[in-house]
Image (cartoon, helix red, strand yellow):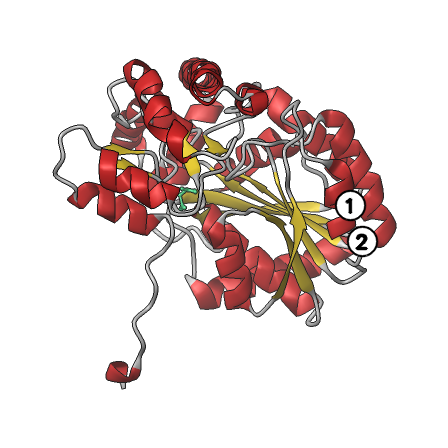
Amino acid sequence: LLDKLEKAPADPLLGVMAAARADTRPDKIDLGVGIYKNSEGETPVMAAVKEAERILIEEETTKAYEGPHGNPLYCDQVGKMILGELTDRHTVFATPGGSGGLSIGMQLAKVASPGARLFVSQPNWPNHVGIGKAVGYDIHTFDWVSSSDGTPDMERVKAGLADARAGDVVLLQGPCHNPTGTDFSPAQWSEISSFLGGKGVLPFIDVAYQGFGVGLEEDIAPIRDFLAALPEAIVTYSCSKNFGLYRERTGALVLQAPSADALDAARGQAAGIIRTSYSMPPAHGPAVVATILSRPALREKWLAELDEMRGRLNFIRENFASALVRETNSDSFARIAHEKGMFATLPFKKGGVEAIREAHAIYMPGSGRVNIAGLSEDRIDEIARKMAPQLNP
Ligand code: LMR
């Protein structure tokens, strides 16, 4: 039977990671998969995580099952980090990474609304579309185009969502849009909240980079207001980047229902989908996060590390933006300094990404997305110079 399967295409992001690893040129640089790297190009375990792991080794008493929600302290702490306060209309599940939460949340929405269509930004993170298709959604897109101030062109967003109606699902990203770095301003979050509220669609917010934009609280505040204004929503969360827990698969799924009774039903349905998907979430990552967030000294340590990562990203953004403006003679790249998080998407000429990979061992996905954190400070000018001839300013 298995010999009847066709060869699957390489994943657009994981394929780049594998190709970069296989390249033996000493000056190769991987700007592909979204992993935070420090100035040395490394992704060390965060000091707060190491300390939490030491505590867990000492204090953990059992490996018995935790149940479909996973670690209750983690669910409570992460839920509060997102929403401020949890009410009887909210429930939180620990999930295997943000992707696990996306899959369960999308399946749940499909059970509630079998005819639902899924609206995602264009460009998007390919796995949003991949998971949506796997769940059986008809995918629709809305344009996500950066204005000169680094925020999206709201008219184009609304035009792309004009056709969305009650029973549909609209996926928006929290801070640090992947792959563009183009984020709603707080005023735009409020505008889109009224717009979507008027349509009765189900908002689905994917938060994967809290703390990488402006600050931990600043990044989530407009999303909190957005959620407070609407009766129901699904939120997914990833601790991969802000806790550096990539391989531990540490995420969350938050359900906000219109009433406590509705929540009860949604919680039960979600637990059922979890049971038949992976039964229960992994425990280690959530235990690390819960340990960090519930101990003030450790939380401070983690926040300081997060601030440092954000500071580095912003430093590189500013310098990379200036280098591109200089090398291309075009101000259009100045927006990169105002955009947020780990990614920027550059307008390469057709075949440009492949040409740069071939000539200079600079690795990026075909979309032209650049992992800002992958740029080492001392190579910013050189990389901008090598990219410039292949860019359409
Ligand atoms: C990325 O976009 O590169 C990351 O979120 C990693 C992934 O799983 O795709």
Specify the label residue 335 is tagged with: none
The residue at the point 36 percent across, 56 percent down is: 11
Query: What amino acid is at disc 2?
Result: Ala
Residue 197 is left or right of residue 363, and the answer is: right
Query: What amino acid is at disc 1?
Result: Lys
Question: Considering the image in quadrants, where does the N terminus appear?
Answer: bottom left
Foreground residue, 212 or 301? Answer: 212
Q: Position of residue 28 (x, y in %)?
A: 21, 32
- Tell me whether the residue at label 2 lies in contact with that at label 1, contact meaning CB atoms closer than 8 angstroms: yes
Q: Ligand 1 quadrant?
A: top left
Number of on-image labels: 2
Q: Which residue is mark 1?
A: 158
Q: Is residue 6 above or below residue 95?
A: below
The residue at the point 24 percent across, 37 percent down is: 359
Residue 8 makes an appearance in the image: yes
Q: Position of residue 186 (x, y in %)?
A: 73, 26
Circle 2: is it few (<14), some (14-19), or many (20+) Cα within 10 Å?
few
Circle 1: is it few (<14), some (14-19), or many (20+) Cα within 10 Å?
some
Label 2: state its secondary structure: loop
The residue at the point 70 percent across, 27 percent down is: 185
Q: Residue furthest bottom?
A: 1
Residue 63 makes an appearance in the image: no
Q: Is residue 334 above or below residue 144?
A: above
Q: CA distance from mark 2 to mark 1?
A: 6 Å
Foreground residue, 338 or 216? Answer: 338
Foreground residue, 105 or 43? Answer: 43
Q: Which residue is mark 2?
A: 162
Q: Is residue 338 above or below residue 12?
A: above
Q: Position of residue 174 (x, y in %)?
A: 60, 36
Residue 126 is left or right of residue 90, and the answer is: left
Label 1: state its secondary structure: helix
